[in-house]
Amino acid sequence: MPGQTREFDDSATLALVRLARDYRAPSPSDAVFPAYRASAEGHVYFFLDRDDGGEPIPMRVDQVVVDLYQDSEGRRRQDIRGLRKKQLLPIREFRYYIDRLTAVQNGFGNLIEIGEGLDVSDVPHPLGSDGESHYHYRIVDSVTIRPQGFPEPIRVHEVEVRPRREDRPAFVGSVFLDATTGALVNMWFSFTPASYVDPRVDRVTVRLDHQRWEGDLWLPYRQVVEVRREMPQFDLPVGSVIRATLRVTDYEFDPDLPAWRFRGPRVTAVPYGAADSTVFEAGLMDRMAEEGLSPVSLERLEDEARHVARQHLASGLPRVRFYTDRFSSLLRANRAEGVRLGLGASYSPRPALKLDGRAGLATGSRTPGATVRGRWTSPGGSSTTTLELYAAQLRDTGPRPGASNALNTLSTLFRNLDYSDPHFATGVRVGLERPLGESASVEIGGVIEEHSGPGEAWSAGWGPDASGRPLLAPEEGVYA
């Protein structure tokens, strides 16, 4: 009821759920199924879905026409009599699971499957025979509708369905039920992560809309099934989506349906392109705008792919890796530290964010040191923000290095000759960098740090300078 929140599993809600369960599966003595023939037409869209909010990129569109049959004993059959497709961009050929091209005639069975059980499998139906052992229920809204051609209004309750255990395959969403009969009017739902069979599946959403026909019959009218996949090995800012839409019309009740029509497979299909174009009422591309899709050129796709590649080049690598900015961060030697050993790691929780850290211990001075840095790239790569914290970071007092770190390490170890005048800095640095075209950038930032001199000079004990050159004391203090 509007403005009123019910508790889960109250008596009124459970009574309605049980009424709906009995309506779906009447006892054999009471079972009477409406016999009908109907036609359905729909489209299946395959497109790339971007995480950055950009427009989706359609890759392929299919169109299907299917005839639906049900007899008074509840036997069902579907014949796909029209199939055609168009590739909008170059992709590898593939086939759809048959349930992407057909209608859900009975609101699913006791167990819900999507993608012939390879996307979603073994999900208990909330209105199935043992639904109450898997779900909690709550009426969250009610609405009165007045279908055209029916004198009396119909009260419909929205029942929220919540799984008792989220670590099991389960339905998550709502069922809309006729308050008088318990007939299923609509279903809007998704699934718990444990429901997904294919490791590439990110999410599956389903919407089934029924329409009232003769008497109290609620029969399929429109359905949308959307499956979004990503590559589990890569944290890429894009996923592939299959959106299958179907609209059922032209119901004919109590037709002559001979028994032979229900023999053999429950679904038959003609090959792609075998049917004449006159079997399709709508055009192949007619409803793309309605679905929020518009074709893109190959040139535009290549431009966007290059842009994404530049911004997310490393996103396919493991999120946690060993890291060093240079070899001397792992091993170096000088008069201030002696021999210093270090190790580092990097972590990328998202493509736009990278964290790295390095730590080490100087065996001569027994001084630990560490650096932690975070870099965040804004959407679209328009700027990069860096924050760096460091303690006991090695510096050289001279205006320029006397030798490379590698050469200085070898010279210090084997000749006892250190070309640097080392000291230490502890502080914080913040920077903002913006690209200027393809090959230039501008950076602004600020630093505050404290400089300190080393203790006693370390000596290898041999070489031409066995006593070691004395250390130069820097101007100690805080600098900004």
Image: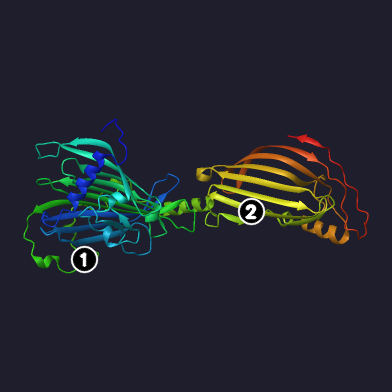
Left or right placement of residue 411 versus residue 36 in this view: right
Quarter of the rendering occupied by the N terminus: top left
Give the residue displayed 85% in from the left and 54% down from the top.
418
Quarter of the rendering occupied by the C terminus: top right
Q: x, y percentage for residue 383? A: 56, 42
Colour mode?
A: rainbow
In the picture, residue 198 is in which quadrant?
bottom left
Secondary structure under the numbered disc 1 in the rendered image: loop
Q: Give whichever of 320, 284 is nearer the camera.
A: 320
The 10 Å Cα crowd at callout 2, few under 14, some 14 to 19, many 20 or more, is: some
Q: Amino acid at mark 1?
A: Val
Of mark 2 and mark 1, the one earlier in the sequence is 1
Q: Give whichever of 72, 37 is nearer the camera.
A: 72
Q: Which mark is residue 86?
A: none
Q: Give whichever of 256, 435 is nearer the camera.
A: 256
Q: Which mark is residue 345?
A: 2
Give the residue displayed 84% in from the left and 60% down from the top.
413
Which residue is farthest front?
Answer: 11
Front of the two marks 2 and 1: 2
Secondary structure under the numbered disc 2 in the rendered image: strand
In the picture, residue 477 is in which quadrant?
top right
Q: x, y percentage for residue 196? A: 38, 57
Which residue is farthest top?
Answer: 3
Q: Amino acid at mark 2?
A: Ala
Q: x, y percentage for residue 43? A: 26, 54
Q: Give whichever of 9, 239 is nearer the camera.
A: 9
- Using the image, determine if residue 371 lies above or below residue 463: above
Q: Which mark is residue 270?
A: 1
Give the residue displayed 79% in from the left and 40% down from the top.
451
Q: x, y percentage for residue 171? A: 32, 50
Asked if one can make out residue 294 in the rendered structure from this viewpoint, the answer is: no
